[in-house]
Image (cartoon, coloured by chain):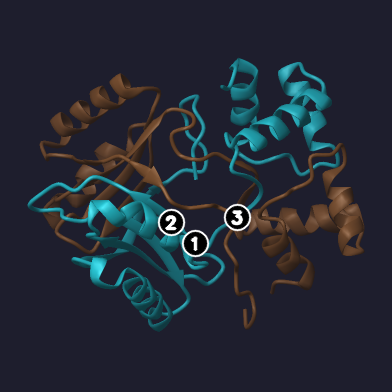
Amino acid sequence: MLDETDRKIIQATQAGLPLTPQPYQAIAEQLGLTSDDVMLRLAAMKNSGSIRRIGAVPNHYKLGYRFNGMTVWNVPDEVIDELGQQVGRLDFVSHCYHRPRHLPEWPYNLFAMVHGKTQQAVDKQIQQIADLLGDSNLGCDVLYSTKILKKTGFRTSNRPVTD
Amino acid sequence: MLTTLHKQLLNDYQQNFPLSPRPYQDIAEALGVTEADVLSALTELNDNNFISRIGPVIPPNHIGVSALIAMAVPEQHLQTVADKISAHPEVNHNYEREHRFNLWFVVIAADAEHLDALIDAIEQETSYPAMLLPMLDDFFIDLGFKLDLNND
């Protein structure tokens, strides 16, 4: 479980590590800790899974991945764990979640975000997911974003964003 | 526009960024450049928005309670409704998507009660029902995303 100091470290690093030679030292000074504290706590949070990874967070859109589709699938509940894990492992899928259905207007329970540089590339990815799901694909849709109305890297309230 | 160093930093350092006193120096040694080269390349990537940051990525629901929410809003009211929703600091993504459910946003609340109160407030302010889609399971092992940076 994360304690208050862990949370402060997470919060202090969500806008990014400082691009100065000793970034952990800079964070430590800000929080009244030592740089060893900061590094050890980050390592522990990474080991426990509270931090998923530490590294560069690329902006897909800016790097040419202009076609970003939210693919949604209706998959039988008995097989969603197994199939969801397989879909999540595809290298072009950036997020893959099980979410509840809202019948009758929303029958989809598996969400996978795909990213491509062209519409054809994304179409191919969607087909790959459909092939993987096979007979367990009871219906699907793809929702493309037409407008980003808000995207904040760092929240203005005092809790950090997830990715 | 992207140099070899930019591409290496983008693809090879989405995970396992060094937890050492001089991480940029360690990266520089691994890539055969100087610490100053690494820092200036990362600053360029950051300033040009090719990366949103370098740092820890937190899985959903490890801190706070998050949910995806969808709304079906008539096109002529979409911007007004979206602005009301985006005004809440707990909302960190808000997208228009091509679908009957055309407004999709993510909220992160401190706890379940805070989330409920926030959704009630949003429904009242906008007078549209919110379809709540919390994450039940996360199937994604985030090891970074393999970027094809050729021909750029």
Q: Is residue A39 above or below residue B24?
A: above
* Label 1 environment density (alpha carbons within 10 Å; few <14, some 14–19, many ≥20): some
Are the residues under badges 1 and 2 in a single subunit?
yes
Where is mark 3, residue-wise? B143
Classify mark 2: helix, strand or loop. Answer: helix
* Label 3 environment density (alpha carbons within 10 Å; few <14, some 14–19, many ≥20): some
Q: Depth check: B26 or B118 in front?
A: B26
Classify mark 1: helix, strand or loop. Answer: loop
Amino acid marked by disc 3 = Leu
Where is mark 1, residue-wise? A89
Give the Cα separation between the discs numbered 1 and 2.
Answer: 6 Å
Q: Name which residue lies at 33% across and 35% down.
A: B87
Q: Position of residue B24 (x, y in %)?
A: 83, 49
| Tag 1 near tag 2, CB within 8 Å | yes
Q: Is residue B104 visible?
A: yes
Give the Cα separation between the discs numbered 2 and 3.
Answer: 14 Å
Q: Position of residue A74 (x, y in %)?
A: 22, 60
In front of the other: label 3 or label 1? 1
Of all residues shown, which one is farthest toward the left? A104
Q: Which chain did the renderer colour brown?
A: B
The color chain A is rendered in: cyan
- Label 1 is found on which chain of the structure? A
Q: Name which residue lies at 37% across and 60% down.
A: A83
- Label 3 is found on which chain of the structure? B
Residue B123 position by quadrant: top left
Amino acid marked by disc 2 = Gln
Amino acid marked by disc 1 = Arg
* Label 2 environment density (alpha carbons within 10 Å; few <14, some 14–19, many ≥20): some
Q: Name which residue lies at 77% across and 18% down.
A: A33
Where is mark 2, residue-wise? A85
